[in-house]
Image (tube, rainbow, N blue to C red):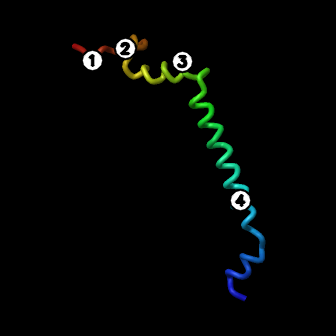
């Protein structure tokens, strides 16, 4: 018997199919969460966060000398 015949007879392809279904479901869930209108304010704040000036934290010195 060759290795291909042994692996084919073992019935392991079901694990690949289960993994594909799980990945697809999780990916669809992430897409739905990302593009849901109720999450728009959260993503708008995150999009603008790098552009907003924040006050320096305690113990930090300003580098604008």
Q: Which mark is residue 53?
A: 2
Sequence-first tag of 4 and 3: 4
> Residue placed at 24% from the left, 15% from the top?
64
Whether label 4 touches label 2, CB < 8 Å: no
Whether label 2 touches label 3, CB < 8 Å: no
How far, Cα to Cα, is label 4 from label 3? 37 Å
Sequence-first tag of 3 and 1: 3
Q: Which mark is residue 63?
A: 1
How far, Cα to Cα, is label 2 from label 1? 14 Å
Binning the other alpha carbons within 10 Å of mark 4 as few (below 14), some (14 to 19) or many (20 upward) gives few
Q: Residue furthest right?
A: 10
- Indicate the secondary structure of the residue bearing disc 3: helix
Q: Of residues 19 and 32, which is closer to you in this image?
A: 32
Q: Of residues 30 and 54, which is closer to you in this image?
A: 30
Sequence-first tag of 4 and 1: 4
Whether label 3 touches label 1, CB < 8 Å: no
């Amino acid at each position: 018997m060759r290795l291909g015949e042994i692996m084919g007879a073992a019935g392991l392809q079901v694990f690949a199919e289960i993994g594909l279904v799980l990945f697809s479901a999780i990916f669809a869930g992430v897409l739905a969460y990302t593009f849901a209108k109720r999450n728009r304010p959260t993503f708008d704040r995150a999009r603008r966060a790098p552009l907003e000036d924040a006050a320096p934290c305690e113990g930090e010195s300003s580098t604008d000398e």
